[in-house]
Structures are given as C-alpha cells and as structure tokens.
Amino acid sequence: MTSTLTSAGGAAAADPRPAAASPRPSVTRRATFGGVVKSERIKLFSLRSIKLTLGITVLFGIGLSALVAIVFSGELRDAATGGGMGFLTTDDAGLRSYLMLVATVATPFLALIFGVLGVFSISSEYSSGMILSTLAAVPKRWPVFFAKGLVLALVAGVAAIVLTAGGLAAAVLCYPDAAPQLANGMVISGALGAVAYLVLTALLAFGVAALLRSTAGGIAVIAGLVFVLPIAFELLSMTGWEWVSELARFLPSQLGQVMGAGISESTTSAAVDPAMGESTGPDPLTFWGAFAAMGAWVVVFVAPAAVLFARRDAK
C-alpha cells in the first residue's frame, strides 16, 4: 500500500494553468502629413456636393467653350473667304486670339464655381460637426489646415486643366487650321494663367470659409468679390475719380482677365475687348504682376485663417 505524506511547510503544488501573459504597452502611431492628406482627400470626395459641383463645372465649362468655338469658327471661315465682319482673322495672331477666347471664355463664370468648391472643402466639416473628430484624430492643427489646402489645390488644378484643355480641343476640332498655334507661348501662358487663376480663386474661398466657418457666408463673400465688386466699381467709374479705375485693376476678376490673356509678345501690345473687337490701350499690369496680385489676395485671407484655425475652439 502506497501513501503520500504532505507537510505543512511543503511547496504548493504547481498550477497546471499557464500564467497570464503580461499586457503589452499600447503603441500610438503618430499621424504623418501624408496620412492626413490621404484622409482629407477621402473626406473631400465623400461629399456629394463636391461631386456635383465638379460634374456641373466640367459640363458647363466645356459646353460653353464648344458653343463659342462653333460660333467663331464659322466667323473664321467667312473671313477666309473674304467675308465676315468680326474682329477675328485667319492670320497667326487671329488664330491665337481664337484659341485663347474659346479656352478662357468660361473662366469668369467658372471662378464662382471654383469659389464654391473652396468654401465646401472646409465649411462642410463645421456644419456637420466632423471637424471635432478630425482635430481629435490629429491634435496638431497645422497639418490639418495645410492638408486641406493642398488637396483643394490639387483637385481644383486637375479640374481647371481638364476645362482649359477641353476648350482648346473644342477650338481645334471646330477649326483645325488653328492647331499649329497651340505651341505658341502666348497661348500656353494664357491657358496656364487661366488654370492658376481658378486654383487661386478656390484657395481664396478656402481662406474666407475658414475665417467665417459658414457655407452661406463664404459663398456670399466670394460672389461679392467675383461679381458684385466689379459692377460697383464700374458704376463708381462714372464719377471720373482716378482712384476707382486704379483699384478696379486689382480686383480678382480683372486679374483673371490679365492672366488669361497670357504673356504678350510685345510689352506695349494693346488689350483687345473680345466682345467689341476694339483696342482698349496698353495694359500696364503684366501677366506676372497679375499673378503676384492674385497670390496676395490669397495670402490676405489664408494667413489669418490658418492662425485662427490653430488657436480658436473648433465649435
């Protein structure tokens, strides 16, 4: 017979269950700027209003350019046969004017739509309350603000390039003899100037919306800058005050016209009103001067918006 003796001071029997593993320290991944940019891109394209705005913009812009190309290509054909009463001619200068007119004719109207795009890109988060989640995920606010601006600039740039290229394509399809002038520096700079103007308008609206944190307020301000102020200055010019005409040259809409006209081959070339076909005299504001002035408009609104975005409450 076998017996087992246990002493009071004996070692305790080993527990057959495995010892619990010690908890691992949690690893917090730091948000990178690339990740923030990707997040902002996803959020921007998740908005139905953004998709509708881009779709309407492309359809309206290319459609208007095609309509203008049909009308003025017929005028060029009449001019080639010795007829026609318009300002367009079939020489190289006339063909360049035709291409630039078709490519940039919709730019003044598209500026407002790009402004709405810039407003939606940031104001929608404040209206929905998603800005609280965004800033909770990325406590440092500077990357969020600049990521939003970068994504907006890229989207606006691609849309503007598609619109301008579509306008040039419509012009060439309607009048193939104008194709060799596509390589002209004045046409290229004019097309790029129109693209830059639309992108800068979107960024200007982005800064306004970030300051106001209101969709309606942002759209109202952009509409005022793009459409209302030029009309107001036109009325004030009837007074004969010289300072009115001087300031009017620096309105965003006027700067966009100079940028869309491209880099002139002659610094003393006169500006031509496409609607009337009449010379309006030499324009003292150059292409690069208009580009710098439009950039200054953006800085005036975006710089304080960035500071306030980083300092004030999200609500």
Image (cartoon, helix red, strand yellow):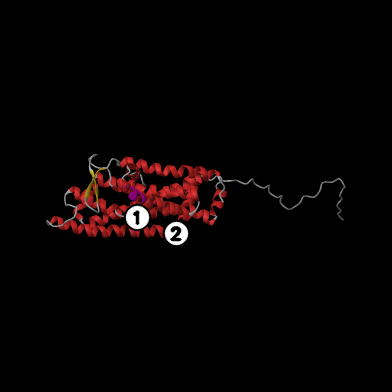
| Residue with the mark numbered 1 | 109
Say whether residue 236 is magenta: yes
Q: Residues within 10 Å of mark 2 (few under 14, many from 20)?
A: some
Decide if residue 54 is in sight here.
yes
Where in the figure is residue 300, as x and y percent of width and height? Answer: 43, 42
Residue at the image position 23 percent from the left and 59 percent from the top: 71
The dominant secondary structure in magenta is helix
Query: In the rendered view of the protein, which quadrant contains the N terminus?
Result: bottom right
Element assignment for label 1 = helix
Mark 1 and mark 2: Cα distance apart in space: 18 Å
Viewer can see residue 35? no
What is the count of numbered marks? 2
Q: Nearer the viewer, residue 53 or 172?
A: 53
298 inside magenta stretch: no
Q: Which mark is residue 49?
A: 2
Q: Earlier in the sequence, mark 1 or mark 2?
A: 2
Which amino acid lies under the numbered mark 1 shown in the image of this protein? Phe
| Residue 240 versus residue 123 in the image, above or below | above
Q: Nearer the viewer, residue 17 or 110?
A: 110
Residue 160 shown left or right of residue 300 in the figure: left
Q: Nearer the viewer, residue 202 or 304?
A: 304
Which residue: 76% across, 51% down?
15
Q: Do residues under tags 1 and 2 come within 8 Å of each other at their CB atoms?
A: no
Given the current orientation, which residue lies at the most extreme left position? 82
Query: x, y percentage for residue 66?
Result: 27, 59
Measured from the top left, where is residue 249 in percent x and y?
Answer: 33, 44
Disc 2 is placed on an element classified as helix
| Amino acid on which disc 2 is placed | Ser
Q: Which residues are magenta?
A: 232-237
1 vs 2, front mark: 1
User: Within 10 angstroms of label 1, few (less than 14), some, or many (20 or more) residues?
Assistant: some
The picture places residue 298, in percent across and down from the top left corner, at 41, 44
